Image (tube, grey):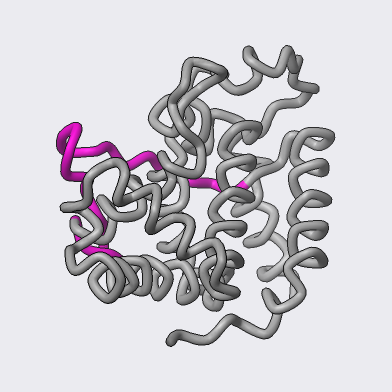
């Protein structure tokens, strides 16, 4: 069983911190600079140097179970959530422990599927996947992992599209949100400010 990072053990505090961050994004127009990755098909999703294509597909599968495409708002695909998370994994210096937790959780989900349902998670039927999600959420580790994924989904709903989230402002449109000014650009985004502070130290 992989370990829950110490800073995620108190999930309520971590989520509160993320909510404060998201609120500051909306108010100040500053967000993570995240290039967009595209899926290579509707079934298999392209990974990156941190995850394999199979791991990316598992992540996408779980995200779509946590945030189903039921016609009530934008889907995971609409929000580009999977690719938003994949690109967080590339920012090792900023998200080291979060990244490890996410990747280990992907592998844990597949191992849990094999242990309980005798099949890889990508080969489960819809009913079997529902059962697996129940098993995962009842587990302390799985519950925290799924909660972190949901938090990142909310972020992909409201971050500025320039950074790889909610293309064409689909999330803002659904929420009826009008972004403030100035909007982030290459001169005032998170990476630019991070570099500026480091250069001055």
Apparent side of residue 123 relative to residue 129 in the rendered image (left or right): left
Please identify the quadrant where the N terminus is shown: bottom left
Report whether residue 50 is seen.
Answer: no
> What span is colored magenta in the figure?
32-53
- In terms of depth relative to the viewer, which is nearer, 29 or 165? 165
- In terms of depth relative to the viewer, which is nearer, 159 or 74? 74
Report whether residue 155 is seen.
Answer: yes
Does the stretch in magenta take in 44?
Answer: yes
Q: Main secondary structure of the magenta part?
A: loop
Residue at 39 percent across and 30 percent down: it is 77
Residue at 79 percent across and 22 percent down: it is 181
Residue at 60 percent across and 82 percent down: it is 5
Does the stretch in magenta take in 37?
Answer: yes
Q: Position of residue 197 (x, y in %)?
A: 73, 65
Can you tell which quarter of the image residue 185 is in? top right
- In terms of depth relative to the viewer, which is nearer, 141 or 99? 141
Apparent side of residue 14 relative to residue 139 in the rendered image (left or right): right
Can you tell which quarter of the image residue 147 is in? bottom right
Can you tell which quarter of the image residue 37 is in? top left
Q: Position of residue 38 (x, y in %)?
A: 27, 37
Please identify the quadrant where the C terminus is shown: bottom right
Residue at 48 percent across and 15 percent down: it is 71
Q: Position of residue 118 (x, y in %)?
A: 19, 69
Q: Position of residue 24 (x, y in %)?
A: 82, 43
């Amino acid at each position: 069983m992989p370990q829950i990072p110490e800073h995620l053990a108190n999930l309520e505090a971590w989520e509160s911190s993320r909510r404060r961050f998201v609120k500051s994004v909306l108010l100040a127009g500053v967000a993570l600079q995240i290039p967009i990755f595209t899926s290579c098909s509707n079934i298999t999703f392209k990974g990156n140097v941190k995850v394999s294509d199979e791991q990316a597909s598992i992540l996408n599968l779980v995200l779509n179970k946590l945030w189903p495409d039921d016609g009530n708002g934008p889907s995971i695909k609409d929000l580009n959530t999977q690719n938003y998370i994949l690109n967080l994994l590339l920012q090792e210096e900023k998200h080291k422990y979060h990244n490890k937790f996410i990747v280990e959780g992907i592998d844990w989900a597949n191992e849990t599927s094999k242990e309980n349902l005798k099949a890889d998670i990508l080969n489960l039927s819809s009913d079997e996947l529902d059962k697996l999600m129940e098993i995962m959420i009842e587990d302390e580790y799985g519950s925290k992992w799924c909660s972190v994924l949901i938090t990142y989904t909310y972020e992909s709903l409201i971050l500025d599209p320039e950074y790889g989230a909610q293309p064409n402002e689909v999330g803002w449109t659904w929420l009826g949100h009008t972004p403030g000014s100035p909007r982030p650009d290459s001169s005032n985004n998170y990476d630019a400010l991070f570099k500026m502070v480091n250069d001055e130290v």
